[in-house]
Image: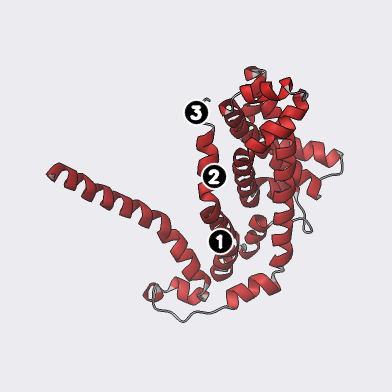
Amino acid sequence: MRPRTSYQVFRGVALTVVVLGLIAPLVWMVAASFKTNVDIYDPGKALAFVPTLANYATVLQQANYIEFILNSLWVAFAATVASLILGVPAAYSMSRFNMRKSALVVLMARVIPGVSLLVPWFYVFSNLKMVGGFGVLIISHMFVSLPLVVYIMMGYFDSLPEELEEAALVDGLTHVGAFRRITLPLSVPGIATAGILSFIFSWNNFMFALVLSDADTKTLPVAIFDFVGYASIDWGGLMAATTVVTLPIMVIALFVQKYVVSGLTAGATKG
């Protein structure tokens, strides 16, 4: 019993250290969003301070962040839906017809650094007069969302027994009908997982929107940079804006984590 008790103590201490290390920056961020810049620089007011909502008023009213939030929602939603529409049938075809080489080419997009594509993209989309529009942002976000959908759904389709589709074909359905009526309803957990992860990526994306957006299509992560000046930084406004970006995704992650886990593990076994 003694070694077991020692292991439990060690595990508890290790988990506590890891959790505190992850939560401490978030706690500081939220606390700083309710402080003035003077209080943020004062170590004596790290815990004891008079909270203020002025930073959130700046973010939500003066800085017009409602428009940036709507821009982020639209780009993330459109990129996620488009990636699912293209990626789910593609993943099904690659899974059922053993197109592993084609799948490897698609998944290479997960390896290529996105920053290496920014200059070619900017050149191409500038000539097409698309820079600054929502279309170019959606396409650029799909560069990572689409391979992610294909990667997740291939594993999920591999786990579904092919006998179900064969039975549907015997009953008179076509391959498309079997996919639409049998396979697709069974793959809803995997689709939900891929959609959630794609939405989170698109919501948090900064690099593509920084280069390819303009003042009207600016997304929330890029808008945060408005609080960073040449000679000074509005830390209170910056922390409030960061909290506005972070909290919605954290709430979504807490509520849908069980679906994400179930969707990922469902494709981990065959049959």
Asked if residue 126 is positioned above or below residue 165 in the image, the reply reads below
Farthest residue toward the left? 2
The label on residue 269 is 3
The label on residue 260 is 2
**Mark 2 or mark 1, whichever is nearer to me:** 2
Residue in the picture at 67% in, 21% down:
166
Instruction: Identify residue for label 1.
Output: 247
**Mark 1 or mark 2, which is nearer the start of the sequence?**
1
CA distance for labels 2 and 3: 16 Å
CA distance for labels 2 and 1: 18 Å
Observer able to see residue 64: yes
Q: Secondary structure at mark 2?
A: helix
**Mark 2 or mark 3, whichever is nearer to me:** 3
Residue in the picture at 64% in, 70% down:
59
Amino acid at dot 1: Leu
Q: Secondary structure at mark 3?
A: loop
**Mark 3 or mark 2, which is nearer the start of the sequence?**
2
Q: Write down the quadrant of residue 178 in the picture.
A: top right
